């Protein structure tokens, strides 16, 4: 007897797979990874200035790189790529936690709880300084439209209403908005700027070509894209009024990059709607970067924007990183074009290998013995013919997140990688010691060379390490599940790129992970 309920469920699941855009082979591979687990990365050592894996540039070299960058910028080779998909929930998590309580919020209660609970301590500090936040004017206007006065609310200790008008849809709705729409900075002359606005102003400095056109690409979540379009349209008109030209592009994270969720037993997680798919983290944005059709892309997170007083140093080091990439590309492309034309002699090949070691920290070639010269040449050619990234690194002052490390591969060779703690077996004392010895932090300040020596776009999928994703434990409607994140955009997704690390001043790194003054 045929169980038609089972048949109907199978048909529903098959139709859902087709509609999801996730390829069947990708789906099977994801299920395999849940069962097999993700292998840990083996750290060889931390990247430092002392061991030469992080460059500390002399001022005269910086000036030379700035000149290289200015030429590339004028030629229209440079654009900015900003992942702007994430919601601002984390920024307001303490306010949300306090609002979730049944407490009758008052100064007395907040002060009493602040000694014991960090969320109350944060909320107390926030309310004491609320007039200093960039969005205070918008908050006041939002309350006034509904007949409330911000001054009365603060005087009468009606703090619950004030917090609700910040995070909930009745007011600003900031906890549900993308970070790019949050008002980040207020200036003395009364101007208030969102993160989107600050990124556009930055782009005008270090991506504007000889015609004055600056190009910026934002990735945006589908549920926010219409609001973002409206906001960017208003900003674009304001810039046009001041005779600035902006080419603003938007893309959404593709549904085809979603990954399947599984039960704790690694079986597909089923709901009434069938299979449960989830967004696969910022590694999914490799698709967007691959579609960019750009030459040089400056990658920077949406929440890492500086106020005007810090912009000059930010502008300088964007150009320094870009110029270094351009210089390296010129030499690499010269080698590749020549090797394509003719067979190099062994001394010439050893010279190329020395360049790879000194400038790109590729140390696995110079000391190898090759009987067949053309095999050595082909290996050198393949190693140099890859996407290139120059990554700014700031001194580590306790920020959470990844850092620069020398990673040992399965063939015992090494490469420079940006590594997150979740990729490392921290139960292994030696690996933990290396991780904790890191002197620098990854601020996601990366200049990417996306074209090869012929001017053709690299297929970035060919340079991703698929075994460097993450498996995390989540929940859905009270049920535990396991989620798979694709290799991170600047971690495993760029694992097989050629990489250069450069120390940059900490003043260039100004992230807004939580609301602050």
Image (spheres, helix red, strand yellow):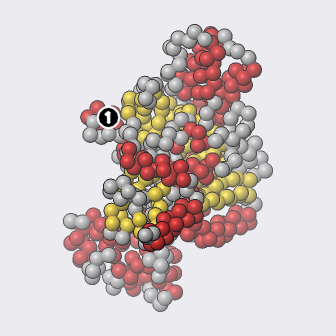
The vertical placement of 468 against 261, above or below, is above
How far across and how far down the image is residue 410, in percent?
43, 29
Q: Nearer the viewer, residue 363 or 327?
A: 363
Q: Quadrant of residue 221?
A: bottom right
Q: Residue at x 60, y 46 (%)?
A: 298
Residue matched to label 1: 431
The vertical placement of 68 against 220, above or below, is above
Image quarter (top left, top right, bottom left or bottom right) of the C terminus: bottom left
**Tag 1 secondary structure:** helix
Q: Quick one: which residue is furthest to the front in this view?
A: 1
How far across and how far down the image is residue 288, in percent?
61, 52
Q: Quick one: which residue is furthest to the bottom in this view?
A: 147
Q: Residue at x 60, y 42 (%)?
A: 460
The vertical placement of 126 against 286, above or below, is below
Image quarter (top left, top right, bottom left or bottom right) of the N terminus: bottom left
Q: Is residue 332 left or right of residue 510?
A: right
Q: Is residue 342 left or right of residue 81?
A: right
Q: Residue at x 74, y 66 (%)?
A: 241
Would you call the spot at circle 1 few (<14 residues within 10 Å), some (14-19), or many (20 or more)?
some
How far across and how far down the image is residue 509, in percent?
48, 48
Q: Residue at x 50, y 81 (%)?
A: 142
Whether residue 351 appears in this view of the structure is no
How far across and how far down the image is residue 24, in percent?
54, 53
Q: Is residue 203 left or right of residue 43?
A: right
Q: Is residue 368 left or right of residue 272?
A: right
Whether residue 137 appears in this view of the structure is yes
């Amino acid at each position: 007897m045929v169980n038609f309920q089972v048949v109907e469920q199978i048909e529903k699941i098959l139709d859902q797979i087709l509609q999801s855009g996730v390829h069947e082979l990708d789906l099977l591979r994801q299920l395999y990874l849940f069962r097999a687990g993700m292998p840990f990365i083996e750290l060889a050592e931390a990247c430092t200035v002392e061991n030469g894996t992080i460059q500390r540039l002399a001022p005269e070299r910086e000036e030379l790189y700035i000149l290289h960058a200015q030429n590339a910028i004028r030629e229209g080779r440079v654009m900015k790529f900003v992942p702007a998909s994430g919601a601002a929930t984390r920024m307001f998590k303490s306010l949300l936690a306090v609002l979730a309580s049944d407490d009758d919020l008052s100064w007395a209660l907040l002060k009493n709880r602040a000694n014991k609970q960090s969320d109350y301590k944060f909320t107390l500090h926030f309310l004491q300084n609320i007039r200093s936040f960039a969005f205070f004017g918008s908050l006041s206007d939002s309350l006034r439209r509904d007949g409330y006065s911000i001054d009365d609310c603060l005087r009468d200790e009606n703090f619950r209403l004030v917090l609700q008008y910040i995070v909930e849809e009745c007011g600003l709705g900031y906890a549900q908005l993308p970070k790019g729409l949050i008002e980040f900075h207020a200036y003395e002359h009364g101007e208030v700027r969102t993160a989107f606005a600050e990124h556009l102003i930055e782009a005008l400095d270090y991506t504007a070509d000889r015609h004055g056109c600056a190009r910026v690409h934002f990735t945006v979540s589908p549920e926010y894209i219409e609001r973002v379009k409206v906001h960017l349209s208003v900003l674009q008109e304001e810039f046009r009024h001041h005779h600035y030209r902006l080419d603003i592009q938007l893309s959404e994270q593709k549904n085809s990059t979603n990954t399947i969720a599984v039960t704790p037993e690694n079986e597909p997680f089923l709901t009434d709607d069938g299979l449960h798919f989830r967004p696969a983290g910022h590694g999914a944005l490799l698709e967007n970067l691959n579609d960019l059709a750009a030459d040089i892309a400056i990658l920077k997170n949406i929440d890492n924007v500086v106020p005007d007083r810090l912009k000059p140093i930010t502008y300088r080091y964007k150009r320094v990183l870009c110029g270094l990439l351009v210089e390296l590309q010129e030499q690499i492309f010269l080698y590749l074009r020549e090797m394509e034309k003719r067979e190099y002699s062994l001394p010439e090949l050893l010279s190329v290998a020395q360049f790879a070691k000194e400038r790109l920290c590729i140390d696995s070639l110079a000391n190898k013995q090759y009987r067949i010269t053309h095999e050595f040449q082909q290996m050198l050619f393949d190693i140099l013919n890859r996407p290139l990234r120059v990554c700014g690194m700031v001194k580590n002052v306790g920020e959470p997140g990844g850092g620069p490390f020398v990673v040992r591969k399965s063939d015992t060779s090494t490469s420079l990688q940006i590594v997150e703690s979740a990729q490392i077996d921290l139960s292994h004392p030696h690996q933990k010691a290396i991780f904790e010895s890191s002197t620098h932090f990854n601020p996601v300040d990366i200049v990417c060379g996306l074209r090869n020596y012929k001017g053709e776009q690299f297929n970035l999928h060919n340079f991703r390490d698929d075994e460097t994703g993450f498996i995390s434990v989540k929940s859905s409607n009270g049920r535990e599940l396991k989620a798979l994140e694709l290799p991170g955009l600047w971690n495993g997704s760029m694992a097989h790129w050629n990489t250069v690390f450069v120390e940059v001043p900490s003043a260039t790194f100004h992230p807004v992970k939580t609301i602050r003054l």
